[in-house]
Amino acid sequence: MCAICGCSDDSKTTVSSAEAGAASAAHDHAHWPGDDHAHPHGHGHDHDHDHDHDHGHGHGHGHDHTHGLDHSHGPGHSHGVEPDRDAARTVSLERAVMAKNDRAGERNRARFEARGILALNLVSSPGAGKTSLLERTLRDLRGELDISVIEGDQETLNDAERIRATGARAVQINTGAGCHLDAKMVSAGLAALAPAEGSIVMIENVGNLVCPALFDLGESARVVVLSVTEGEDKPLKYPNMFRSSQLMLLNKIDLLPHLRFDVAACLAYARRIHPGIAILQVSATSGEGMSGWYEWLRAQREAVRRGQGVWE
């Protein structure tokens, strides 16, 4: 179980591609084509094996030997786990989970940088229009930019099939009960996707404005998609997501004449949370504003190819 949000672990995670079918393993060290089994650890054998132990010190594994039993022998005599100790172990486990994910994210980032790949983590609440935005982008830029996609959902291959219908390569990651992608899942997806050098990889995260904000996937930048149908106060309600994103796409602006949505307030809220966030107003349906999004993609792709990184 994920110690951060309580969702299940990746034991039921599946990675599906049109070429390879489905595989149920999502390993930290999934080999990408061209890796030649070389891991970007900084030295030879720094493998991040997960033994599910909370190693607080040399040989102490932090196992709870109470087996969930709270033996009570009358007033003032209890062997239950003390609240402060239990809280400390929870914090320790959360840190271990995040540290492990961050190491896997750094490995992904090193591989992206070595190949000059622009990797974007697309996040939003369900129904904000991420997949429609990707479909429009892939069709409009077909033949100009090499873009492949990792789709993250709890179940179904629906979104990956929609992406493949545009002619783009796509891999579907189904997380089961998981409410977010993590770096290990993305590494497995990239092994199946095999993105080309100098290309763009779009990672469409599970629809959720909470947990995905905490997990570094190794992306070059995070793009949050906010729909005008959701309410202008979303940046205030979910500050971690907007604070950690470099670009906000305000989508479905073609619907503004039919809604009570304060655009100026929304933009002000987003900049209150993250003063440096870039904001573009777009409609994946009508195409309005999409040219600005495409120019942003071209500029970031070239920056990564020149080894300048994003947002320097």
Image (spheres, rainbow, N blue to C red):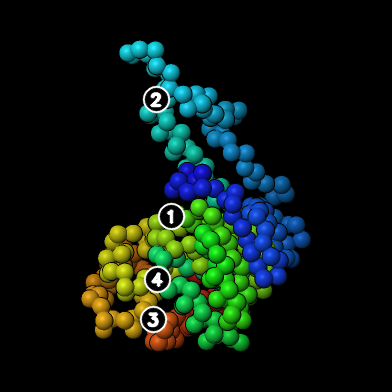
Q: Earlier in the sequence, mark 4 or mark 3?
A: 4
Residue 211: assigned label: 1
The amino acid pointed to by label 4 is Ala
Report the residue at 64% width, 46% height from top. 48
Query: In this rendering, would 134 be left or right of 186?
Result: left
Answer above or below: position of 25 versus 200: above
Farthest right residue?
A: 36
Residues 99 and 16: in front is 16
Report the residue at 74% width, 66% height from top. 34
The amino acid pointed to by label 2 is Glu
Query: In this rendering, would 50 be left or right of 284?
Result: right
Identify the element where label 2 is drawn: loop
Identify the element where label 1 is drawn: helix
Residues at marks 4 and 3 touching, judged by CB atoms closer than 8 Å: no
CA–CA distance between discs 3 and 1? 25 Å
- Count neighbours of disc 3 (C-alpha within 10 A) and say few if under 14, some if 14 to 19, many if 20 or more: many
